[in-house]
Amino acid sequence: MQARQALTDIQFLLTEVLQAPAQWQALAPFGDTDGELAAQVLEEAAKFVDSAVAPLQRTGDEVGCRFDAGQVHTPPGFRDAYQAFWQGGWPALACAPEDGGQGLPAVLECVLFEWLAGANHGWTMAPGLLHGAYECIKHHASDALKAQYLEKVATGEWLATMCLTEAHAGSDLGLVRTRGVPQPDGSARVNGSKIFISGGEHDLTDNIVHLVLARLPDAPAGPKGLSLFLVPKVLQDGGRNAVVCERIEEKMGLHGSPTCVMRFDDATGWLVGEPNKGLAAMFVMMNAARLHVGLQGIGLLEAAWQKASAYAAERRQMRAPGAKDTSLIQDHPAIRRTLHTQRAWIDGGRVLAYHTALQLDVAKHSTDAAARAAAQRWCALVTPVLKAALTDQGFHGASACLQVFGGHGYVSEWGIEQIVRDARVAMIYEGTNEIQAIDLLVRKVLADGGQGLAALLATLPGAAPSPAASARRHALVEITQTLAIAAQTDPELPYWVADDYLRAVALVLLDWAWGEISAVAQGERGSEPTQAPERWSTPAQALAQWVLPEFEMRAAMLRQRIAQALEIKPKMAATA
Protein backbone atom coordinates (compact mmCIF):
# COMPACT_ATOMS: atom_id res chain seq x y z
CA MET A 1 0.00 0.00 0.00
CA GLN A 2 1.12 3.54 -0.72
CA ALA A 3 0.16 5.75 2.22
CA ARG A 4 0.47 8.97 0.24
CA GLN A 5 -2.18 7.70 -2.16
CA ALA A 6 -4.65 7.58 0.74
CA LEU A 7 -3.56 10.83 2.38
CA THR A 8 -5.96 13.21 0.61
CA ASP A 9 -8.98 11.03 1.38
CA ILE A 10 -8.01 10.69 5.03
CA GLN A 11 -7.43 14.42 5.44
CA PHE A 12 -10.92 15.02 4.03
CA LEU A 13 -12.52 12.52 6.40
CA LEU A 14 -10.66 13.86 9.43
CA THR A 15 -10.88 17.60 8.89
CA GLU A 16 -14.13 18.05 6.99
CA VAL A 17 -16.36 15.08 7.79
CA LEU A 18 -15.38 14.50 11.44
CA GLN A 19 -14.01 18.01 12.07
CA ALA A 20 -11.43 16.26 14.21
CA PRO A 21 -9.18 19.25 14.98
CA ALA A 22 -12.06 21.10 16.63
CA GLN A 23 -12.92 18.00 18.64
CA TRP A 24 -9.44 17.33 20.00
CA GLN A 25 -8.63 21.02 20.55
CA ALA A 26 -11.58 21.15 22.98
CA LEU A 27 -9.55 18.79 25.21
CA ALA A 28 -6.83 20.36 27.35
CA PRO A 29 -3.88 18.13 26.34
CA PHE A 30 -4.40 18.89 22.63
CA GLY A 31 -5.32 22.56 22.68
CA ASP A 32 -2.18 23.51 20.75
CA THR A 33 -2.51 20.76 18.13
CA ASP A 34 -4.16 22.47 15.19
CA GLY A 35 -5.12 20.98 11.86
CA GLU A 36 -1.98 22.25 10.15
CA LEU A 37 0.29 20.48 12.64
CA ALA A 38 -1.72 17.26 12.30
CA ALA A 39 -1.48 17.47 8.52
CA GLN A 40 2.30 17.84 8.75
CA VAL A 41 2.53 14.81 11.06
CA LEU A 42 0.50 12.69 8.65
CA GLU A 43 2.50 13.90 5.65
CA GLU A 44 5.74 12.82 7.30
CA ALA A 45 4.19 9.57 8.48
CA ALA A 46 3.13 8.75 4.93
CA LYS A 47 6.67 9.43 3.67
CA PHE A 48 8.16 7.13 6.31
CA VAL A 49 5.71 4.31 5.62
CA ASP A 50 6.18 4.48 1.86
CA SER A 51 9.98 4.77 1.94
CA ALA A 52 11.05 2.62 4.92
CA VAL A 53 8.35 0.00 5.55
CA ALA A 54 6.43 -0.72 2.34
CA PRO A 55 9.54 -1.79 0.34
CA LEU A 56 10.13 -4.64 2.84
CA GLN A 57 6.71 -6.25 2.25
CA ARG A 58 7.78 -8.92 -0.22
CA THR A 59 11.10 -9.61 1.52
CA GLY A 60 9.29 -10.24 4.78
CA ASP A 61 7.00 -12.76 3.11
CA GLU A 62 9.54 -14.59 0.95
CA VAL A 63 12.52 -14.65 3.34
CA GLY A 64 10.61 -14.70 6.60
CA CYS A 65 12.05 -15.08 10.09
CA ARG A 66 14.83 -17.55 10.86
CA PHE A 67 15.04 -19.53 14.11
CA ASP A 68 18.49 -20.56 15.33
CA ALA A 69 19.06 -22.15 18.76
CA GLY A 70 16.58 -19.96 20.59
CA GLN A 71 17.34 -16.80 18.66
CA VAL A 72 15.13 -15.25 15.99
CA HIS A 73 16.54 -13.31 13.05
CA THR A 74 14.03 -11.07 11.31
CA PRO A 75 14.11 -10.55 7.51
CA PRO A 76 16.72 -8.27 5.94
CA GLY A 77 15.98 -4.60 6.50
CA PHE A 78 13.47 -5.13 9.32
CA ARG A 79 15.80 -4.11 12.15
CA ASP A 80 17.05 -0.99 10.37
CA ALA A 81 13.48 0.08 9.61
CA TYR A 82 12.43 -0.47 13.20
CA GLN A 83 15.39 1.44 14.60
CA ALA A 84 14.49 4.37 12.34
CA PHE A 85 10.88 4.04 13.45
CA TRP A 86 11.47 4.41 17.17
CA GLN A 87 14.27 6.92 16.85
CA GLY A 88 11.95 9.03 14.70
CA GLY A 89 9.45 9.13 17.55
CA TRP A 90 6.66 7.32 15.72
CA PRO A 91 5.70 4.81 18.46
CA ALA A 92 5.33 7.66 20.94
CA LEU A 93 2.85 9.81 18.99
CA ALA A 94 -0.02 9.44 21.47
CA CYS A 95 1.97 8.81 24.66
CA ALA A 96 2.16 11.49 27.35
CA PRO A 97 5.11 13.93 27.12
CA GLU A 98 6.15 13.13 30.69
CA ASP A 99 6.64 9.52 29.58
CA GLY A 100 8.75 10.39 26.57
CA GLY A 101 5.81 10.72 24.18
CA GLN A 102 4.63 13.47 21.88
CA GLY A 103 1.19 13.94 23.43
CA LEU A 104 -0.74 13.96 20.14
CA PRO A 105 -4.36 12.81 19.67
CA ALA A 106 -4.95 9.06 19.48
CA VAL A 107 -6.52 9.33 16.04
CA LEU A 108 -3.18 10.32 14.46
CA GLU A 109 -1.59 7.18 15.87
CA CYS A 110 -4.52 5.19 14.46
CA VAL A 111 -3.96 6.54 10.96
CA LEU A 112 -0.26 5.72 11.19
CA PHE A 113 -0.89 2.12 12.22
CA GLU A 114 -3.57 1.67 9.57
CA TRP A 115 -0.99 2.65 6.98
CA LEU A 116 1.71 0.48 8.49
CA ALA A 117 -0.54 -2.60 8.44
CA GLY A 118 -1.50 -2.00 4.83
CA ALA A 119 2.10 -1.42 3.80
CA ASN A 120 3.66 -4.34 5.66
CA HIS A 121 1.50 -6.26 8.10
CA GLY A 122 4.29 -8.63 9.15
CA TRP A 123 6.65 -5.81 10.16
CA THR A 124 3.85 -3.90 11.90
CA MET A 125 3.14 -6.82 14.23
CA ALA A 126 6.29 -5.87 16.18
CA PRO A 127 5.18 -2.41 17.40
CA GLY A 128 1.48 -3.30 17.29
CA LEU A 129 1.17 -3.94 21.03
CA LEU A 130 3.29 -1.04 22.22
CA HIS A 131 0.51 1.41 23.00
CA GLY A 132 -1.53 -1.20 24.87
CA ALA A 133 1.52 -2.25 26.88
CA TYR A 134 2.25 1.39 27.64
CA GLU A 135 -1.29 1.97 28.97
CA CYS A 136 -1.14 -1.23 31.01
CA ILE A 137 2.15 -0.32 32.68
CA LYS A 138 1.17 3.31 33.16
CA HIS A 139 -2.12 2.54 34.93
CA HIS A 140 -1.32 -0.67 36.81
CA ALA A 141 2.42 -1.08 37.43
CA SER A 142 4.24 0.02 40.57
CA ASP A 143 6.25 3.22 40.60
CA ALA A 144 9.44 1.18 40.56
CA LEU A 145 8.40 -0.72 37.44
CA LYS A 146 7.22 2.46 35.76
CA ALA A 147 10.54 4.15 36.45
CA GLN A 148 12.40 1.31 34.77
CA TYR A 149 10.11 0.32 31.89
CA LEU A 150 7.47 2.94 31.06
CA GLU A 151 9.54 5.35 28.97
CA LYS A 152 11.34 2.53 27.18
CA VAL A 153 7.99 1.08 26.09
CA ALA A 154 6.40 4.47 25.38
CA THR A 155 9.17 5.44 22.99
CA GLY A 156 9.41 1.99 21.44
CA GLU A 157 13.07 1.57 22.37
CA TRP A 158 11.95 -1.75 23.89
CA LEU A 159 9.16 -3.81 22.37
CA ALA A 160 6.50 -5.69 24.35
CA THR A 161 4.44 -8.86 24.13
CA MET A 162 1.13 -10.04 25.53
CA CYS A 163 1.52 -13.63 26.81
CA LEU A 164 -1.93 -15.12 27.32
CA THR A 165 -2.46 -18.26 25.26
CA GLU A 166 -1.37 -21.75 26.32
CA ALA A 167 -1.62 -24.94 24.31
CA HIS A 168 -4.69 -26.10 26.25
CA ALA A 169 -6.07 -22.59 26.90
CA GLY A 170 -6.88 -20.52 23.84
CA SER A 171 -9.83 -18.19 24.30
CA ASP A 172 -10.64 -19.82 27.67
CA LEU A 173 -8.09 -18.01 29.82
CA GLY A 174 -9.53 -19.54 32.95
CA LEU A 175 -7.54 -22.68 32.07
CA VAL A 176 -4.15 -20.94 32.26
CA ARG A 177 -1.60 -22.98 34.27
CA THR A 178 1.50 -20.75 34.23
CA ARG A 179 2.47 -19.93 37.82
CA GLY A 180 4.10 -16.96 39.50
CA VAL A 181 5.60 -17.62 42.94
CA PRO A 182 6.36 -14.51 45.08
CA GLN A 183 9.91 -14.11 46.38
CA PRO A 184 11.15 -12.35 49.53
CA ASP A 185 12.64 -9.49 47.48
CA GLY A 186 9.25 -8.60 45.97
CA SER A 187 9.84 -10.32 42.64
CA ALA A 188 8.25 -13.56 41.46
CA ARG A 189 9.47 -16.75 39.83
CA VAL A 190 7.40 -17.40 36.70
CA ASN A 191 7.11 -20.90 35.27
CA GLY A 192 5.06 -22.11 32.31
CA SER A 193 4.70 -22.11 28.54
CA LYS A 194 2.85 -19.78 26.20
CA ILE A 195 2.06 -20.19 22.51
CA PHE A 196 1.17 -17.85 19.64
CA ILE A 197 3.29 -15.03 21.11
CA SER A 198 3.84 -12.41 18.41
CA GLY A 199 7.37 -11.05 18.68
CA GLY A 200 8.26 -13.25 21.64
CA GLU A 201 11.87 -13.25 20.44
CA HIS A 202 13.55 -11.11 17.74
CA ASP A 203 16.53 -8.89 16.95
CA LEU A 204 14.66 -5.60 16.48
CA THR A 205 15.31 -4.22 19.97
CA ASP A 206 17.79 -4.93 22.77
CA ASN A 207 15.08 -5.91 25.25
CA ILE A 208 11.54 -7.32 25.14
CA VAL A 209 9.02 -6.68 27.91
CA HIS A 210 6.73 -9.68 28.34
CA LEU A 211 3.39 -9.17 30.08
CA VAL A 212 2.42 -12.64 31.27
CA LEU A 213 -0.83 -13.99 32.70
CA ALA A 214 -0.11 -16.50 35.48
CA ARG A 215 -1.47 -17.79 38.79
CA LEU A 216 -0.24 -17.11 42.29
CA PRO A 217 0.09 -20.25 44.47
CA ASP A 218 -3.08 -19.53 46.44
CA ALA A 219 -5.12 -18.21 43.51
CA PRO A 220 -8.72 -19.37 43.03
CA ALA A 221 -9.55 -21.42 39.95
CA GLY A 222 -10.82 -19.83 36.77
CA PRO A 223 -10.29 -16.35 35.31
CA LYS A 224 -10.70 -14.66 38.71
CA GLY A 225 -7.45 -16.28 39.83
CA LEU A 226 -5.21 -14.77 37.16
CA SER A 227 -2.49 -12.23 37.91
CA LEU A 228 -0.31 -10.23 35.53
CA PHE A 229 3.49 -10.24 35.65
CA LEU A 230 6.09 -8.15 33.86
CA VAL A 231 8.91 -10.45 32.77
CA PRO A 232 11.74 -8.81 30.79
CA LYS A 233 13.99 -10.64 28.36
CA VAL A 234 17.02 -8.82 29.82
CA LEU A 235 17.26 -8.02 33.53
CA GLN A 236 18.42 -4.71 34.99
CA ASP A 237 21.95 -6.02 35.57
CA GLY A 238 22.23 -6.89 31.87
CA GLY A 239 21.88 -10.65 32.42
CA ARG A 240 19.55 -12.76 30.30
CA ASN A 241 16.35 -13.76 32.08
CA ALA A 242 15.18 -17.39 32.06
CA VAL A 243 12.85 -16.79 29.10
CA VAL A 244 13.33 -19.20 26.21
CA CYS A 245 11.92 -19.21 22.70
CA GLU A 246 11.46 -22.89 21.85
CA ARG A 247 10.43 -22.43 18.21
CA ILE A 248 8.59 -20.18 15.80
CA GLU A 249 5.46 -21.29 13.96
CA GLU A 250 5.17 -21.96 10.23
CA LYS A 251 2.13 -19.92 9.24
CA MET A 252 -0.28 -19.20 6.41
CA GLY A 253 0.85 -15.57 6.35
CA LEU A 254 2.70 -12.91 8.35
CA HIS A 255 6.01 -14.61 7.60
CA GLY A 256 7.85 -11.45 8.61
CA SER A 257 6.51 -11.71 12.16
CA PRO A 258 7.86 -14.41 14.48
CA THR A 259 5.02 -16.23 16.24
CA CYS A 260 6.79 -17.86 19.15
CA VAL A 261 6.40 -20.69 21.62
CA MET A 262 7.79 -19.25 24.85
CA ARG A 263 8.94 -21.06 27.99
CA PHE A 264 9.46 -19.39 31.35
CA ASP A 265 11.86 -21.40 33.55
CA ASP A 266 11.93 -19.72 36.96
CA ALA A 267 12.03 -16.41 35.09
CA THR A 268 12.20 -13.28 37.21
CA GLY A 269 9.10 -11.14 37.02
CA TRP A 270 7.11 -8.59 39.00
CA LEU A 271 3.43 -8.34 39.71
CA VAL A 272 1.54 -5.71 37.71
CA GLY A 273 -1.57 -4.48 39.46
CA GLU A 274 -3.37 -6.35 42.22
CA PRO A 275 -3.14 -10.10 42.87
CA ASN A 276 -5.79 -12.09 41.00
CA LYS A 277 -6.80 -8.96 39.02
CA GLY A 278 -4.61 -9.69 36.03
CA LEU A 279 -7.41 -9.74 33.49
CA ALA A 280 -8.48 -6.22 34.43
CA ALA A 281 -4.95 -4.99 33.80
CA MET A 282 -4.57 -7.06 30.64
CA PHE A 283 -7.83 -5.84 29.13
CA VAL A 284 -6.42 -2.31 29.08
CA MET A 285 -3.97 -3.76 26.62
CA MET A 286 -6.48 -5.87 24.72
CA ASN A 287 -9.06 -3.12 24.18
CA ALA A 288 -6.42 -0.85 22.66
CA ALA A 289 -5.27 -3.76 20.52
CA ARG A 290 -8.80 -4.48 19.26
CA LEU A 291 -9.24 -1.01 17.78
CA HIS A 292 -5.86 -1.35 16.09
CA VAL A 293 -6.84 -4.75 14.70
CA GLY A 294 -9.95 -3.19 13.18
CA LEU A 295 -7.65 -0.61 11.60
CA GLN A 296 -5.55 -3.46 10.23
CA GLY A 297 -8.64 -4.62 8.38
CA ILE A 298 -9.02 -1.19 6.80
CA GLY A 299 -5.34 -0.90 5.93
CA LEU A 300 -5.18 -4.33 4.33
CA LEU A 301 -8.37 -3.72 2.36
CA GLU A 302 -7.00 -0.37 1.15
CA ALA A 303 -3.80 -2.13 0.06
CA ALA A 304 -5.78 -4.77 -1.83
CA TRP A 305 -8.01 -2.11 -3.40
CA GLN A 306 -5.03 -0.07 -4.56
CA LYS A 307 -3.53 -3.07 -6.30
CA ALA A 308 -6.81 -4.17 -7.87
CA SER A 309 -7.73 -0.66 -8.98
CA ALA A 310 -4.34 -0.12 -10.62
CA TYR A 311 -4.52 -3.49 -12.38
CA ALA A 312 -8.07 -2.85 -13.59
CA ALA A 313 -6.94 0.47 -15.10
CA GLU A 314 -4.29 -1.29 -17.23
CA ARG A 315 -5.60 -4.72 -18.13
CA ARG A 316 -7.74 -5.10 -21.27
CA GLN A 317 -10.11 -8.02 -21.69
CA MET A 318 -13.17 -8.47 -23.91
CA ARG A 319 -15.66 -5.71 -24.65
CA ALA A 320 -17.58 -4.03 -21.88
CA PRO A 321 -21.33 -3.62 -22.49
CA GLY A 322 -21.83 -0.96 -25.17
CA ALA A 323 -18.13 -0.81 -26.12
CA LYS A 324 -16.89 -1.33 -29.67
CA ASP A 325 -13.39 -2.50 -28.85
CA THR A 326 -11.56 -4.51 -26.21
CA SER A 327 -12.06 -2.70 -22.91
CA LEU A 328 -10.13 -2.02 -19.76
CA ILE A 329 -11.49 -4.39 -17.15
CA GLN A 330 -12.36 -1.40 -14.96
CA ASP A 331 -15.13 -0.70 -17.49
CA HIS A 332 -16.84 -4.05 -16.89
CA PRO A 333 -19.76 -3.80 -14.43
CA ALA A 334 -18.65 -6.82 -12.38
CA ILE A 335 -15.26 -5.21 -11.71
CA ARG A 336 -16.76 -1.81 -10.98
CA ARG A 337 -19.14 -3.42 -8.49
CA THR A 338 -16.25 -5.11 -6.67
CA LEU A 339 -14.07 -2.01 -6.51
CA HIS A 340 -16.84 0.40 -5.53
CA THR A 341 -18.15 -1.94 -2.83
CA GLN A 342 -14.76 -2.27 -1.17
CA ARG A 343 -14.32 1.49 -1.41
CA ALA A 344 -17.59 1.93 0.49
CA TRP A 345 -16.27 -0.26 3.33
CA ILE A 346 -12.89 1.47 3.45
CA ASP A 347 -14.24 5.02 3.57
CA GLY A 348 -17.08 4.27 5.97
CA GLY A 349 -14.86 2.09 8.15
CA ARG A 350 -12.36 4.92 8.45
CA VAL A 351 -15.02 7.32 9.71
CA LEU A 352 -16.11 4.81 12.35
CA ALA A 353 -12.56 3.96 13.47
CA TYR A 354 -11.37 7.57 13.56
CA HIS A 355 -14.51 8.67 15.43
CA THR A 356 -13.82 5.91 17.96
CA ALA A 357 -10.24 7.12 18.42
CA LEU A 358 -11.54 10.64 19.02
CA GLN A 359 -13.98 9.28 21.59
CA LEU A 360 -11.13 7.50 23.40
CA ASP A 361 -9.54 10.89 24.01
CA VAL A 362 -12.87 12.43 25.05
CA ALA A 363 -13.41 9.62 27.57
CA LYS A 364 -9.93 10.19 28.97
CA HIS A 365 -9.60 13.98 28.96
CA SER A 366 -13.00 15.72 28.81
CA THR A 367 -14.05 17.78 31.82
CA ASP A 368 -17.73 17.16 30.95
CA ALA A 369 -19.00 14.09 32.81
CA ALA A 370 -21.85 13.54 30.35
CA ALA A 371 -19.47 13.73 27.39
CA ARG A 372 -17.13 11.24 29.05
CA ALA A 373 -20.00 8.83 29.72
CA ALA A 374 -21.25 9.05 26.13
CA ALA A 375 -17.72 8.51 24.80
CA GLN A 376 -17.20 5.49 27.04
CA ARG A 377 -20.52 4.04 25.86
CA TRP A 378 -19.50 4.50 22.23
CA CYS A 379 -16.11 2.84 22.73
CA ALA A 380 -17.53 -0.08 24.73
CA LEU A 381 -20.23 -0.86 22.16
CA VAL A 382 -18.43 -0.03 18.93
CA THR A 383 -14.93 -1.46 19.53
CA PRO A 384 -16.02 -5.13 19.20
CA VAL A 385 -18.05 -4.19 16.11
CA LEU A 386 -15.05 -2.57 14.47
CA LYS A 387 -12.72 -5.42 15.33
CA ALA A 388 -15.05 -8.07 13.92
CA ALA A 389 -16.69 -6.34 10.96
CA LEU A 390 -13.61 -4.59 9.60
CA THR A 391 -11.33 -7.62 9.83
CA ASP A 392 -14.02 -9.77 8.23
CA GLN A 393 -14.28 -7.30 5.37
CA GLY A 394 -10.51 -6.94 5.26
CA PHE A 395 -10.15 -10.62 4.42
CA HIS A 396 -13.22 -11.18 2.26
CA GLY A 397 -12.80 -7.84 0.51
CA ALA A 398 -9.14 -8.55 -0.21
CA SER A 399 -10.21 -11.89 -1.67
CA ALA A 400 -12.71 -10.07 -3.87
CA CYS A 401 -9.91 -7.74 -5.01
CA LEU A 402 -7.76 -10.78 -5.85
CA GLN A 403 -10.61 -11.89 -8.13
CA VAL A 404 -10.09 -8.74 -10.20
CA PHE A 405 -6.72 -10.17 -11.29
CA GLY A 406 -8.15 -13.49 -12.39
CA GLY A 407 -5.44 -16.15 -12.47
CA HIS A 408 -2.73 -13.51 -12.07
CA GLY A 409 -4.02 -12.84 -8.57
CA TYR A 410 -3.33 -16.39 -7.47
CA VAL A 411 0.38 -16.22 -8.24
CA SER A 412 2.81 -14.27 -6.11
CA GLU A 413 4.04 -11.87 -8.80
CA TRP A 414 1.39 -9.22 -8.12
CA GLY A 415 1.46 -9.37 -4.31
CA ILE A 416 -2.30 -9.53 -3.86
CA GLU A 417 -2.30 -13.13 -2.63
CA GLN A 418 0.06 -12.16 0.21
CA ILE A 419 -2.46 -9.58 1.41
CA VAL A 420 -5.20 -12.21 1.49
CA ARG A 421 -3.01 -14.60 3.48
CA ASP A 422 -1.82 -11.92 5.88
CA ALA A 423 -5.34 -10.58 6.45
CA ARG A 424 -6.86 -13.89 7.59
CA VAL A 425 -5.36 -13.95 11.08
CA ALA A 426 -6.94 -10.62 12.08
CA MET A 427 -10.30 -12.41 12.32
CA ILE A 428 -8.77 -14.72 14.94
CA TYR A 429 -6.35 -12.92 17.24
CA GLU A 430 -7.15 -10.43 20.01
CA GLY A 431 -10.37 -12.33 20.59
CA THR A 432 -11.96 -14.18 17.68
CA ASN A 433 -14.71 -12.40 15.81
CA GLU A 434 -17.24 -14.79 17.33
CA ILE A 435 -16.08 -13.72 20.79
CA GLN A 436 -16.43 -10.08 19.74
CA ALA A 437 -20.03 -10.75 18.75
CA ILE A 438 -20.80 -12.42 22.09
CA ASP A 439 -19.07 -9.58 23.93
CA LEU A 440 -21.22 -7.05 22.09
CA LEU A 441 -24.58 -8.75 22.47
CA VAL A 442 -24.37 -10.67 25.74
CA ARG A 443 -22.03 -8.52 27.82
CA LYS A 444 -22.70 -5.06 26.43
CA VAL A 445 -26.17 -4.81 24.85
CA LEU A 446 -28.33 -7.26 26.81
CA ALA A 447 -26.68 -6.36 30.12
CA ASP A 448 -28.90 -3.26 30.29
CA GLY A 449 -31.76 -4.54 28.14
CA GLY A 450 -30.51 -2.67 25.09
CA GLN A 451 -30.83 0.79 26.63
CA GLY A 452 -27.21 1.73 25.95
CA LEU A 453 -27.43 0.79 22.29
CA ALA A 454 -30.73 2.62 21.88
CA ALA A 455 -29.18 5.72 23.45
CA LEU A 456 -26.17 5.49 21.15
CA LEU A 457 -28.37 5.26 18.05
CA ALA A 458 -30.59 8.09 19.22
CA THR A 459 -27.63 10.43 19.74
CA LEU A 460 -25.56 9.74 16.63
CA PRO A 461 -24.06 13.11 15.72
CA GLY A 462 -24.41 14.96 12.47
CA ALA A 463 -27.05 15.07 9.78
CA ALA A 464 -30.58 13.79 10.22
CA PRO A 465 -30.82 10.23 8.92
CA SER A 466 -32.57 9.40 5.67
CA PRO A 467 -35.94 7.62 5.95
CA ALA A 468 -34.24 4.31 5.09
CA ALA A 469 -31.49 4.84 7.66
CA SER A 470 -34.04 5.83 10.30
CA ALA A 471 -36.06 2.69 9.55
CA ARG A 472 -32.99 0.50 10.00
CA ARG A 473 -32.17 2.12 13.34
CA HIS A 474 -35.72 1.61 14.60
CA ALA A 475 -35.68 -1.99 13.37
CA LEU A 476 -32.44 -2.65 15.25
CA VAL A 477 -33.87 -1.21 18.48
CA GLU A 478 -37.05 -3.28 18.09
CA ILE A 479 -35.06 -6.46 17.42
CA THR A 480 -32.89 -5.76 20.45
CA GLN A 481 -35.91 -5.33 22.71
CA THR A 482 -37.59 -8.55 21.58
CA LEU A 483 -34.28 -10.39 21.73
CA ALA A 484 -33.89 -9.36 25.37
CA ILE A 485 -37.35 -10.76 26.13
CA ALA A 486 -36.78 -13.98 24.19
CA ALA A 487 -33.41 -14.57 25.87
CA GLN A 488 -35.19 -14.95 29.21
CA THR A 489 -36.94 -18.00 27.79
CA ASP A 490 -34.06 -19.32 25.72
CA PRO A 491 -30.68 -18.47 27.34
CA GLU A 492 -28.81 -19.96 24.36
CA LEU A 493 -30.50 -17.61 21.90
CA PRO A 494 -28.03 -14.70 22.12
CA TYR A 495 -25.13 -17.05 21.44
CA TRP A 496 -26.82 -18.44 18.33
CA VAL A 497 -27.52 -15.03 16.81
CA ALA A 498 -24.61 -12.92 18.06
CA ASP A 499 -22.79 -12.90 14.71
CA ASP A 500 -25.90 -11.80 12.82
CA TYR A 501 -26.58 -9.14 15.42
CA LEU A 502 -23.08 -7.68 15.25
CA ARG A 503 -23.26 -7.57 11.47
CA ALA A 504 -26.60 -5.72 11.65
CA VAL A 505 -25.11 -3.16 14.05
CA ALA A 506 -22.10 -2.71 11.77
CA LEU A 507 -24.33 -1.97 8.79
CA VAL A 508 -26.35 0.61 10.70
CA LEU A 509 -23.16 2.34 11.82
CA LEU A 510 -21.67 2.18 8.33
CA ASP A 511 -24.85 3.80 7.02
CA TRP A 512 -24.42 6.62 9.56
CA ALA A 513 -20.79 7.11 8.56
CA TRP A 514 -21.71 7.44 4.91
CA GLY A 515 -24.49 9.87 5.77
CA GLU A 516 -21.81 12.10 7.27
CA ILE A 517 -19.50 11.70 4.27
CA SER A 518 -22.25 12.44 1.76
CA ALA A 519 -23.53 15.48 3.63
CA VAL A 520 -20.11 17.12 3.40
CA ALA A 521 -19.19 15.87 -0.08
CA GLN A 522 -22.45 17.24 -1.49
CA GLY A 523 -22.04 20.60 0.20
CA GLU A 524 -25.06 20.15 2.48
CA ARG A 525 -23.29 21.78 5.44
CA GLY A 526 -22.79 25.16 3.90
CA SER A 527 -19.42 24.57 2.27
CA GLU A 528 -18.61 23.90 -1.34
CA PRO A 529 -18.46 20.24 -2.39
CA THR A 530 -14.95 18.87 -1.87
CA GLN A 531 -12.97 16.85 -4.44
CA ALA A 532 -14.60 15.37 -7.52
CA PRO A 533 -18.25 14.61 -6.69
CA GLU A 534 -18.05 11.11 -8.18
CA ARG A 535 -15.20 10.21 -5.79
CA TRP A 536 -17.74 9.97 -2.98
CA SER A 537 -21.04 9.48 -4.83
CA THR A 538 -19.90 6.28 -6.55
CA PRO A 539 -19.07 4.30 -3.38
CA ALA A 540 -22.15 5.80 -1.71
CA GLN A 541 -24.27 4.29 -4.46
CA ALA A 542 -22.46 0.96 -4.07
CA LEU A 543 -23.22 1.06 -0.34
CA ALA A 544 -26.93 1.53 -1.02
CA GLN A 545 -27.10 -1.10 -3.76
CA TRP A 546 -24.71 -3.84 -2.64
CA VAL A 547 -23.99 -3.45 1.09
CA LEU A 548 -26.96 -2.13 3.05
CA PRO A 549 -29.53 -4.64 1.68
CA GLU A 550 -27.73 -7.19 3.85
CA PHE A 551 -29.34 -5.53 6.86
CA GLU A 552 -32.78 -6.77 5.84
CA MET A 553 -31.42 -10.29 5.49
CA ARG A 554 -29.79 -10.21 8.95
CA ALA A 555 -32.92 -8.67 10.47
CA ALA A 556 -35.07 -11.44 8.96
CA MET A 557 -32.73 -14.11 10.33
CA LEU A 558 -32.79 -12.54 13.79
CA ARG A 559 -36.58 -12.15 13.83
CA GLN A 560 -37.10 -15.74 12.75
CA ARG A 561 -34.86 -17.13 15.48
CA ILE A 562 -36.42 -14.82 18.11
CA ALA A 563 -39.90 -15.98 17.10
CA GLN A 564 -38.85 -19.59 17.52
CA ALA A 565 -37.58 -18.84 21.02
CA LEU A 566 -40.74 -17.02 22.02
CA GLU A 567 -42.86 -19.99 20.93
CA ILE A 568 -41.09 -22.17 23.50
CA LYS A 569 -42.65 -20.44 26.49
CA PRO A 570 -46.36 -21.29 25.98
CA LYS A 571 -45.46 -24.86 25.06
CA MET A 572 -43.43 -25.23 28.24
CA ALA A 573 -46.25 -23.70 30.26
CA ALA A 574 -48.76 -26.09 28.72
CA THR A 575 -46.55 -29.06 29.52
CA ALA A 576 -46.16 -27.89 33.11
Image: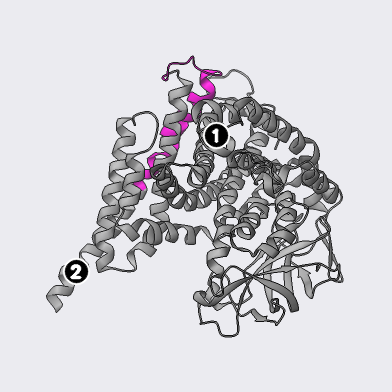
Density class for disc 1 (Cα within 10 Å; few <14, some 14-19, many ≥20) is many
* For residue 315, side relative to residue 564 (left or right): right
The circle drawn on residue 569 is 2
Residue 322, compared with residue 243, is above or below; it is above
Q: Where is residue 336 in the image (x, y as percent from the top left)?
A: 55, 30
Quarter assignment of residue 426: bottom right
Residue furthest out toward the top: 528
Q: Where is residue 472 in the image (x, y as percent from the top left)?
A: 32, 40
> In which quadrant is the N terminus drawn?
top right
Residue 301, compared with residue 321, is above or below; it is below
Quarter assignment of residue 159: bottom right
Q: Where is residue 112 in the image (x, y as percent from the top left)?
A: 66, 40
Please name the amino acid that badge 2 sits on.
Answer: Lys
The residue positioned 51% from the left and 82% from the top of the image is 220
Using the image as rendered, state which of residue 192 and residue 260 is in the foreground.
192
Q: Mark 1 points at which residue?
A: 343
Using the image as rendered, state which of residue 168 and residue 205 is in the foreground.
205
Label 1 SS: helix
Stretch in magenta: 524-553
Residue 479, compared with residue 527, is above or below; it is below
The number of numbered discs placed on residues in the rendered structure image is: 2
The residue positioned 30% from the left and 36% from the top of the image is 470
Residue 360, compared with residue 433, is above or below; it is above
| The magenta stretch spans residue 528 | yes
Please name the amino acid that badge 1 sits on.
Answer: Arg
Q: Main secondary structure of the magenta part?
A: helix
Estimate the spatial distance between the alpha carbons at disc 2 and disc 1, rounded to whole Å.
45 Å
The residue positioned 39% from the left and 48% from the top of the image is 504
Label 2 SS: helix
| The magenta stretch spans residue 147 | no
Q: Where is residue 183 in the image (x, y as percent from the top left)?
A: 70, 82
